[in-house]
Amino acid sequence: MLYIGVDLGTSAVKLLLMNAEGKIESVVSKEYPLYFPHPGWSEQKPEDWWNAVVEGLKELTASCDKSQIAGISFGGQMHGMVALDENDEVIRPAILWNDGRTQKQTDYLNNVIGKETLSKYTANIAFAGFTAPKILWMKEEEPENFARTKMIMLPKDYIAFKLSGVYSTDVSDASGMLIFDVKNKCWSKEMLDICGITEEQVPKIFESYETVGTILPEVAKELGFPETVKIVAGAGDNAAAAVGTGTVGDGRCNISLGTSGTIFISSKTFGVDEHNALHSFAHADGYYHLMGCMLSAASCNKWWMDEIIGTKDYAAEQAKIEKLGENHVFFLPYLMGERSPHNNPNARGTFIGMTMDTTRADMTQAVLEGVAFAIRDSFEVAKSLGIKIERTKICGGGAKSPLWKKIIANVLGIKVDVIESEEGPGYGGAMLAAVACGEFASVEEAAEKLVKVIDTIEPDPELVEKYNDRYAKFAKIYPTVKELFDEVTI
């Protein structure tokens, strides 16, 4: 049988066709626009996602035996708010995960409702990117739209709805809404009340590997698919990527270098760090995970290459970088504000340490190292909880860079395992579909059989020591300029 994984990203949707042995038969990518109507705002049109998915599914399956397609599942950008009216029409553009407009609502939740109360209800505190502040923002700033809202969904769940006609979400994606009781895997009645919505306005909850329904007959007809195709709940992009890299079960780690960057630690037990610096979410394997998320990762490098120095030849720029651990230029990678561990939408990208002999290569190196240092910020929180991490998997667009992987291995001082498939969320989505269709007994079994490590980057003790020194300096920069960010972003 064949299984489809839909990775609904911020810049594009990536669709992947996998056979029962885990071999990727085909991959298709379709881009769509991203809108910034005001500084700090970030929106997309759900209709654009759906059109891209339909077009992509047709292209993906053009040369396969469509009768063999058994299931479709998802990895999707998290936290985005899709609001539907009573006719299931989209009310307004989706407010995305990297949107920073909700500082007032975030402050209200953290300071008036209180971080301790939020953590008790949801295992997390409020971040500007989370869904609950977005709901409050719409209630306060767009009351007419709020009054028309029949259903609030997450991005990938809107696609699942368009395919199946079922309002659904999964436990991993719901965990990032701040209206979900992570420990007990149910909606938090208290948080729904605080946001002014009812349980009828949020979808039914599923485990990531559960079937939510079958494909709608009219959609099956348009795509040429069997009407028996199962639509499977799927997961938030990071949980799906973790499945795709085999980061399931207990004590495994994955680093994702996508538009955003994450460090993801799987656990069979529920846990919360006392400062809520890391997110405590349900995982796609039926258990839990801790996650540190930075809002700009590979997107920092893309910005630097495309917009500032004006090149698409990333490899040629990185080839000029020779002296690792000796760069005097530092970069704070906060181009969209920052989440873990600073929780500050006013944080901004910052270069410091340039002199007259600073080169273009030094600046490029600083960008790559800045992202790695910011990931280490969350890594240090995990270590403070007594979690021992000796190795990590890696995925995302940035993981295609051998230099960046080497930098990360040495900045963190751990082994970095490279897997055969770098498709992350799409591959994880296809694996979840295969589990739902009975191809594997569990997500762990699927990961064990399908995920193969093909290379390991070992840290160099001498370089680790140099980077420890550099990181100690990097860690002092943000606290020093923090108050300045509040002034320059007014």
Image (cartoon, rainbow, N blue to C red):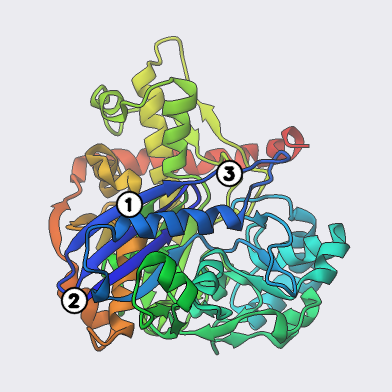
Up-down: is 139 above or below 375?
below
Q: Who's the residue at 44% across and 27% down the image?
A: 306
Provide the residue designation for mark 2: 448
Asked whether 306 or 390 is in front, the reply is 306
Which amino acid, mark 2?
Glu
> What's the distance in space between the residues labelled 3 and 1, CA to CA?
19 Å
Q: Who's the residue at 20% across and 40% down the image?
A: 462
Locate the C terminus and report the quarter of the image it occupies.
Answer: top right
Asked whether 95 or 419 is in front, the reply is 95
Question: Does residue 403 appear in the picture of this structure?
Answer: yes
| Label at residue 34 | 3
Outermost residue to the top: 356
Location of residue 91 (image quadrant): bottom right
Q: Percent from the top left, x then y, of residue 210?
A: 41, 85
Which amino acid, mark 1?
Val
Locate the N terminus and report the quarter of the image it occupies.
Answer: bottom left
